[in-house]
Amino acid sequence: MNLMAAERLRELKGPKVLHRLEEIWHTFYCETLPMLEAILYMVKHKGRPCIRTTTLATFRDVVFLFTNVEDAIIRGKRNLPPGIRHAILILQCVNDSYPPSKNKLKIEFLAAQICSSYIGYYGLYQNGHLIVTSNEPMIISKRRPSADVGGPRRISRPFSIQPQQMDTLNQIFKNAVRHKTPKGRRPLR
């Protein structure tokens, strides 16, 4: 997934953008994400987000919210493609910082639009409208300034991989491919 796909999505309008985004989400979620998780399985993430969290947050920020999909979802929420509903519900579970980033709050708003009752950072939503506000934003605003040195606590991404780890990852990937090679085909070397 790259910015070119997001740029092409930006040119589409209305239901077309939702159907194309649904196709991209399906490919990403069913093929790309599992492959990345398998390839990077051995990468340790002590105190850092796992590969899945990092990848989903990046997809949310770079592809899903890069397009102006909010208007199309709000207008067509009655006939929303199931893949878009699935994407919103999965992406709203990704916590990459606290307090939540602007993109996390955008996804929460979209989830509140498609779910009849939804509890988010700002409170309880009913049919897309905030009906009970949460005290959490007020509590966060009263925190000591020293607790937020440099802004909100961010979960770092991406993390660096040493050259030796990259060689190990390449070897693991080659071994995995070698064991999955269909009969009659030569394994990679």
Image (cartoon, rainbow, N blue to C red):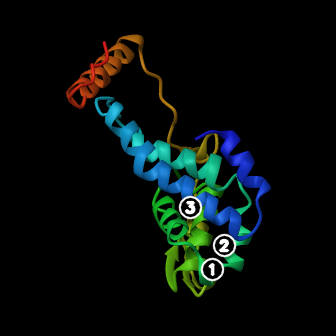
Q: Is residue 116 above or below residue 177?
A: below
Task: Residue at 64%, 65% (x, y): give it.
Answer: 18
Secondary structure at numbered mark 2: helix
Q: Is residue 20 left or right of residue 181?
A: right
Whole-percent x, y for residue 14 in the image: 74, 69
Q: Regarding mark 1 in the picture, which secondary structure is present there?
A: helix
User: Which of the two labelled residues, at mark 2 and mark 3, occupies the earlier sequence position?
Assistant: 3
Query: Quick one: label 1 or label 3, which is nearer the N terminus?
Result: 3
- The amino acid sitting under disc 3 is Glu
Q: Is residue 128 above or below residue 26?
A: below
Badge 2 density bin: few <14, some 14–19, many ≥20, Cα 10 Å? many
Between the residue at mark 1 and the residue at mark 2, the CA separation in whole angstroms equals 5 Å
Residue 74 in the figure: left or right of residue 174 = right
Based on the displayed image, in which of its 4 quarters is residue 139 positioned? bottom right
Distance, label 2 to label 3, CA atoms, is 12 Å
Drawn side of residue 81 relative to residue 71, left or right:
left
Q: Is residue 69 above or below residue 59?
A: below
The mark found on residue 17 in the picture is none
Q: Residue furthest front?
A: 184
Residue corresponding to mark 2: 73
Q: Nearer the viewer, mark 1 or mark 3?
A: 3
What residue is at 64 percent from the left and 45 percent from the top? 151
Q: Quadrant of residue 11?
A: bottom right
**Could you tell me if the residues under marks 1 and 3 are in contact, i.e. CB atoms within 8 Å?**
no
Which amino acid, by three-letter code, is at mark 1?
Answer: Lys
Contact (Cβ within 8 Å) of mark 1 with mark 2: yes
The location of residue 184, given as percent across then percent down, is 23, 25
Give the camera-side residue of 109 and 122.
109
Q: CA distance from mark 1 to mark 3?
A: 14 Å
Q: Would you identify the image quadrant in which residue 173 lies?
A: top left
Secondary structure at numbered mark 3: helix
